Structure formats: C-alpha cells, structure tokens
C-alpha cells in the first residue's frame, strides 16, 4: 500500500465490518459519457476500462471477497461489429496489463457466461489469465461475459435435469441449494450490493437469482466517471442500511 492510499481520509470513514463481501456492478453509460463530450463511443469504453482498474484495486484494498462486473451481456452481441471488436480488444488489453497485478494482489480471475462465444484469441487469453491467477486467495474478480441471468438459470435447470435423468440425483432433492450449486456463480458468496451507474433503474438480466437479498445502489454517474469517491459513497450508503432478510428491525436489534 502506498502512503497516498493509506492516508486517504475517505477510507477512514468506512467501517470495514460494514462493507459488502460481494459487490456486483452493472457498468453503464460509457456511450453517453463519450457522446456528452462529442467523442466516439469507444472512447467511453476505454475510459470505462480505467474505471474497472480503479474499482478492482479499491475493492481488493478494502478486503472484499468478491467483485462481479457485467462486462458484456448476451444482448451486447447485437451491437455494431466494430464496437464488439473494440470491446474485445479492450478486454484483451485489460487481461494482459492486469495479469501481473492480479497475481501479486491475490486476485483470482473468474468468468461467467457463454464464454465459448468469445473470439478465439480473447477466449484463449481469458483462459490463460484464469489459469495464471488460479492461486489467488484474497478476492475473486468475476467478469460476466456473453452473460444472461435467465440463460444461467436455464442451464442450471438443464444440468440438474440431466443428472436426475441419469439417476444421479432424486428430483425431490432439488432445492434452492442444489440450484445455486448449478449456477455459474457456485462457490461465490451471496451478492450483498448491486451498483448500477448512469441513471438507469433496471437489472437487465444480471445475476437474477443471486440478487434476491442484495441492496441496490443506483447513481446518475456514468461508468467512466465512477471512481473511488463514488465507490466509497456507495459503500457508505450501504453501511447505513439495515438488512432485515424478512425479519423485523426489533428482532435484529434483539428487542
Ligand atoms: C455499458 O455502456 C457498458 C458496456 C456494454 C461494456 C462495459 C465495458 C467496459 C467497462 C470496458 C471494458 C471491460 C473490461 C472488463 C476491461 P454502454 O455502451 O451501454 O453505454 P450507453 O448506455 O451510454 O450507450
């Protein structure tokens, strides 16, 4: 940790015990950010990739167990070919440039989604980086790529149905834990906090099962402008909320 990081006053205001263990982010508004400055959309994605670097580093430093980023949805395949190529190039650049840092900081890279749809070179780089960081025990960074929540739940149901058809499991034993264990996110903690940037108030098919009890934080800030102050503000607001999981406030306070 550099002296600058250590003395950041905004960090002192955060109670480590009140931070989320698992943060998920819908990174939205790259295109509008660029357009508002009269620039090409790709410039927004480039600056968005810088926000990814900043947020990953901050979450690791704060000791989060898991960070899951919606980097490319199933629906994003419908974007112009040139934009898809630019996003894949940026992802490749991110993987190459962050690999060493991820290893040094104990970050394990994970991917969820139909990643076999990615261009071969991106897919190979992703697999290489996941293998290189597989020893990371401090934080899991999951990139949702070619991801859709309904797609994920459907594949989990298919997986369990196949196991039942082979006689490996009894259909009556399929409960919430079995379904959660068949999702791409199996092994990750529950999502505690979901952030969506750019003023949109939607979930857009992201982690549909996993956000059942998550707190939501919506901000008008476009993703390329979402940096440490905005992240700390989201954590500060999260810490001030009482998560009741269906119980009463009095029950939780022991009253
Ligand atoms: C939404 O902005 C963002 C995306 C579709 C992709 C997110 C990608 C990055 C942040 C950069 C590369 C990723 C990594 C992991 C390095 P939008 O284009 O939908 O914005 P708009 O709604 O304003 O058009």
Image (tube, rainbow, N blue to C red):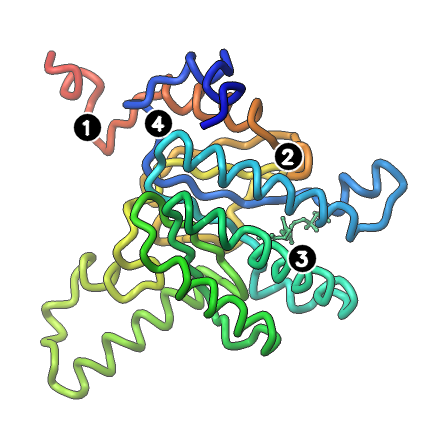
Q: Which residue is drawn at 54% across and 45% down?
A: 26
Q: Residue at x 72, y 48 (%)?
A: 46
Q: Where in the figure is residue 114, as x and y percent of width and height?
A: 48, 71
Q: Which residue is drawn at 70% across and 65% down?
A: 84
Q: Where in the figure is residue 134, as x and y percent of width and height?
A: 35, 60
Residue count near mark 1 (Cα–Cα under 10 Å), binned few <14, some 14–19, many ≥20: few
Q: Depth check: 36 or 9 in front?
A: 9
Mark 4 or mark 3, which is nearer to you?
Answer: 3
- SS for dot 1: loop
Q: Distance between the residues labelled 3 and 1?
A: 44 Å
Q: How far apart are marks 1 and 4 (CA)?
A: 21 Å
Residue on which the image places disc 4? 19
Looking at the image, residue 220 sits to the left or right of residue 241; the answer is right
Q: Earlier in the sequence, mark 2 or mark 1?
A: 2
Q: Residue 25's mark?
A: none
Q: Earlier in the sequence, mark 4 or mark 3?
A: 4
- SS for dot 4: loop
Q: Which of marks 2 and 3 is nearer the N terminus?
A: 3
**Label 3 C-beta lies within 8 Å of the nearest ligand 1 atom:** yes
Residue on which the image places disc 3? 90
Q: In which quarter of the image is the C terminus?
A: top left
Mark 2 or mark 3, which is nearer to you?
Answer: 3
Q: How far apart are marks 4 and 2 (CA)?
A: 23 Å
Q: Residue 199's mark?
A: 2
Compared with 116, 210 (above or below) is: above
């Amino acid at each position: 940790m550099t002296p600058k990081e250590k003395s950041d006053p905004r960090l002192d205001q955060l109670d480590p015990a009140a931070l989320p263990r698992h943060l998920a982010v819908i990174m939205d508004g790259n295109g509008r950010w660029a357009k508002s400055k009269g620039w090409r959309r790709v410039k927004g994605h480039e600056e968005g990739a810088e926000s990814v670097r900043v947020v990953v580093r901050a979450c690791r430093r704060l000791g989060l167990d898991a960070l899951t980023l919606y980097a490319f949805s199933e629906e994003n395949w419908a974007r112009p070919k040139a934009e898809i190529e630019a996003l894949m190039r940026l992802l490749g650049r991110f993987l190459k440039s962050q690999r060493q840092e991820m290893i040094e900081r104990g970050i394990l890279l994970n991917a969820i989604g139909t990643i076999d749809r990615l261009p071969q070179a991106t897919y190979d780089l992703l697999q290489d980086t996941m293998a290189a960081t597989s020893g990371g025990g401090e934080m899991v960074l999951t990139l949702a790529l070619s991801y859709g929540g309904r797609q994920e739940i459907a594949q989990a149901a298919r997986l369990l149905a196949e196991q039942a058809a082979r006689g490996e499991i009894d259909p009556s034993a399929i409960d919430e834990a079995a379904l959660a264990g068949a999702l791409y996110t199996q092994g990750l903690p529950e999502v505690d906090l979901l952030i969506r940037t750019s003023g949109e108030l939607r979930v857009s098919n992201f982690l549909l099962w996993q956000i059942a009890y998550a707190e939501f934080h919506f901000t008008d800030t476009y993703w390329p402008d979402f940096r440490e102050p905005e992240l700390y503000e989201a954590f500060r607001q999260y810490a001030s909320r009482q998560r009741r999981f269906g119980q009463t406030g009095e029950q939780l306070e022991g009253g």
